[in-house]
Image: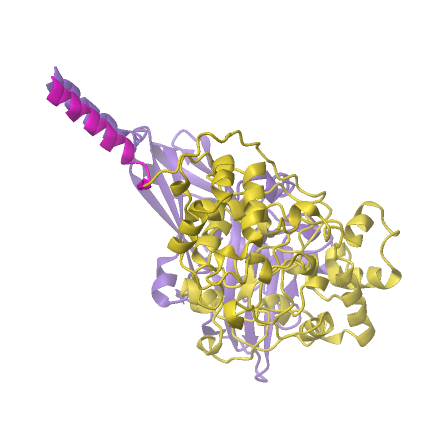
């Protein structure tokens, strides 16, 4: 009898620290890699813009909320898999780190074959009406730094840096979208499968040059160099909206 | 049977402790069980306009823990020569700073940076974030700061923990207080972790929101003067809700609203104190020295502006003697550095502030002073 009890206790002792994973789910890893004109985007590194003015650009910050992530299964049913996450390029301080990108892991995704992915850039007005105090600080929604109390809004995206003009003068830029009405929804059609207790990776590429220099949606980094958003309809609001729209449109699945 | 039975018991114990931190039992026990242990749970009630305070799960706050912490905070017994206590650098009527540009330890030894205010310090803790406390974010929690900070620092208390623990274990009254706060059975269970927990509990009660700004928030246009209101308008700028002609842009880093009046966003930044061309050239690397992240060199904690009128001199090195100097620094746009905060590099009207507008800003900052707690017995020295 003891021969039976002994291994049982050993097994119990071991497994009390390791809960059994659910065989009906797997993990989806979303990797966000940013680039500028085809090369990994390294923060604090001066890049040539390939336009006459400004001549160079130095990114210092490229952070944003993603939200309401859904995946579409083979019978066209959408499954909601994550409410909110925060993508930050803060570690892009070397070529290696920038090449690696920012990884977001979503656990307990139902196993199966999928054909679509929907992702929000920024936050819905409904979520934006909540407060950091409504969440644990382990959530990106719980961090004071992601919230601007003055306008009772999360800072949905932060795009910051410096430019150098043709006359050699250096100035800063800052685009913070942080009011309602900014939520952008992107739909993609990747085919992927989630296997039992397996990890599936989807890579996104953020083409940072399209934030400012894409024909038809360019932003004047010299004269419209900053916005903290503002009242709906104001110039500051429209500039912030354009910045987050450009950000959303610059994100591709290669 | 006996042999197998003990095997099973042994394995059960191994299994149990495999998931627990190692527990080192004291070697001697001066029994304290005759003293009552019935701690009263204490909930930090946030001042109006403050969010709920979070704190580490393993240090629930009790009335007895706070009282023990207050005694330890004011007791010079913690320093090697019993000349200084926590309160030496964190004085009640200076918003728990010391009025010095560099903190002063035993024998007048000069510290590396200025003492930080402890007002509303509990709100600096963000769960799961490694860098929450000190100018450079060196410590995750208040408890960690107390264990790893002043006691053994040669320019602060220059003591060693073993000595502190032994002194407190043999003290005529502390063992009983530790029993009341933490339920220890033996005086030898007093250790640095419990000492830190008690002081941290006391510090989490140091919350202040009784300034004229606060009174004005709930009953507008009564408590603030015209000059202070002008300063408030400049401080908020566009953040007040409409495009402003002059914006001092203060509220980006020192943000506040009716339901979140901390005047801090709990972040680190380079606010333009030193001009450097290369991120390696800062004389004090600040957060970057802790994280090893080059872009964080020269970044320091953005502090709350509550009671800022009481905490001169200003900045991590106390370089500005007055609020006028500090405001003047920001109005200059700050010194250039590759990681100068974008809030400063893109502030279009900041550098156009007039002398009188700067005075208005300073007046508003003084309106954030709460002196109502100066005589608060529960925050004062028990000795």
Name the residue furthest top.
A1
The reply to whether the magenta stretch includes residue B25 is yes
Q: Is residue A144 something that shows in the picture? A: yes
Instruction: Please tell me in which quadrant of the rendered image residue A163 appears.
Output: bottom right
Q: Colour of chain B?
A: yellow
Name the residue furthest bottom.
A167
Image height check: is B382 above or below B368?
A: above
Total marks drawn? 0
Q: Position of residue B120 (x, y in %)?
A: 63, 51
Q: Position of residue A212 (x, y in %)?
A: 56, 65
The reply to whether the magenta stretch includes residue A194 is no
Colouring rule applied to residues: by chain
Q: Position of residue A32 (x, y in %)?
A: 42, 53
Horizontal relation, residue B214 to residue B160: left or right = right
Name the residue furthest front.
B172
Give the magenta part as a residue range.
B1-27
Q: Is residue A36 something that shows in the picture? A: no
Q: Camera-side residue: B217 or B252?
A: B217
Residue at horizontal 80 percent and vertical 65 percent from the top = B363
Q: Camera-side residue: B323 or B32?
A: B32
Instruction: Please tell me in which quadrant of the rendered image residue B265 appears.
Output: bottom right
Image height check: is A252 above or below B320?
A: above
Quick one: quadrant of the N terminus of chain B?
top left
Q: Camera-side residue: B177 or B302?
A: B177
Q: Position of residue B270 (x, y in %)?
A: 56, 69
Residue at horizontal 37 percent and vertical 41 percent from the top = A28
Image height check: is B147 above or below B355?
A: above
Q: Colour of chain A?
A: purple
Q: Camera-side residue: B20 or B339?
A: B20
């Amino acid at each position: 009898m003891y021969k039976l009890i002994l291994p049982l206790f050993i097994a119990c002792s071991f497994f009390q620290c390791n809960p059994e994973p659910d065989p009906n789910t797997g993990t989806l890893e979303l990797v966000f890699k940013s680039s500028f004109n085809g090369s990994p985007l390294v923060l604090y590194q001066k890049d040539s813009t390939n336009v006459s003015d400004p001549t160079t650009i130095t990114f210092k910050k490229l952070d944003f909320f993603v939200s309401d992530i859904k995946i579409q299964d083979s019978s066209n049913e959408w499954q909601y898999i994550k409410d909110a996450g925060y993508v930050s390029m803060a570690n892009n301080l070397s070529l290696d780190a920038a090449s690696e990108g920012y990884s977001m892991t979503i656990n307990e995704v139902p196993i199966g074959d999928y054909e679509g992915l929907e992702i929000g850039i920024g936050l819905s007005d409904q979520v934006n009406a909540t407060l950091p105090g409504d969440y644990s600080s382990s959530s990106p929604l719980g961090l004071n730094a992601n919230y601007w109390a003055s306008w009772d809004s999360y800072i949905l995206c932060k795009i910051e840096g410096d430019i150098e003009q043709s006359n050699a003068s250096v100035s800063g830029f800052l685009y913070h979208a942080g009011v309602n009405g900014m939520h952008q929804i992107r739909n993609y059609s990747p085919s992927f499968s989630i296997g039992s207790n397996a990890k599936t990776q989807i890579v996104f590429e953020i083409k940072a040059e399209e934030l400012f220099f894409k024909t038809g949606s360019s932003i004047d980094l010299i004269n419209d160099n900053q916005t903290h958003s503002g009242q709906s309809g104001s110039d500051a609001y429209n500039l912030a909206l354009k910045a987050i729209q450009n950000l959303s449109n610059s994100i591709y699945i290669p | 049977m006996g042999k197998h039975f003990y095997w099973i018991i042994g394995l059960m114990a191994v299994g149990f402790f495999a998931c627990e931190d190692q527990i080192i039992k004291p070697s001697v026990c001066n029994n304290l069980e005759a003293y009552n242990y019935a701690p009263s749970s204490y909930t930090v009630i946030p001042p109006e306009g403050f969010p709920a305070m979070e704190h580490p799960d393993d240090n629930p706050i009790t009335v007895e823990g706070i009282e023990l912490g207050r005694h330890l905070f004011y007791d010079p017994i913690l320093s090697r020569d019993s000349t200084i206590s926590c309160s030496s650098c964190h004085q009640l009527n200076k918003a728990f700073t010391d009025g010095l540009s560099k903190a002063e330890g035993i024998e007048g030894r000069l510290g590396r940076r200025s003492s930080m205010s402890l007002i509303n310090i509990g709100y600096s803790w963000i769960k799961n974030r490694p860098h929450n406390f000190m100018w450079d974010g060196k410590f995750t929690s208040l408890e960690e700061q107390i264990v790893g900070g002043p006691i053994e620092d040669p320019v602060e208390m220059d003591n060693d923990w073993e000595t502190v623990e032994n002194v407190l274990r043999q003290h005529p009254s502390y063992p009983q207080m530790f029993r009341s706060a933490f339920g220890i059975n033996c005086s030898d269970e007093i250790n640095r972790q419990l000492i830190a927990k008690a002081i941290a509990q006391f510090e989490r009660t140091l919350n202040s929101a009784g300034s004229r700004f606060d009174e004005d928030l709930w009953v507008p246009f009564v408590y603030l003067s015209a000059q202070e209101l002008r300063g408030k308008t400049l401080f908020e700028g566009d953040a007040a809700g409409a495009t402003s002609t002059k914006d001092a842009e203060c509220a980006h880093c020192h943000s506040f609203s009716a339901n979140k009046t901390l005047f801090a966003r709990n972040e680190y930044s380079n606010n333009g104190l030193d001009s450097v061309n290369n991120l390696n050239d800062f004389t004090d690397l600040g957060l970057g020295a802790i994280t090893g992240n080059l872009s964080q060199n020269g970044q320091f904690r953005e502090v709350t502006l509550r009671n800022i009128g009481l905490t001169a001199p200003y900045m991590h090195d106390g370089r500005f003697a007055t609020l006028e100097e500090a405001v003047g620094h920001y109005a200059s746009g700050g010194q250039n550095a590759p990681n100068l905060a974008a809030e400063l590099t893109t502030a279009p009207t900041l550098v156009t502030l007039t002398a009188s507008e700067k005075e208005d800003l300073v007046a508003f900052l003084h309106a954030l002073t709460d002196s109502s707690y100066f005589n608060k017995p529960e925050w004062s020295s028990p000795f």
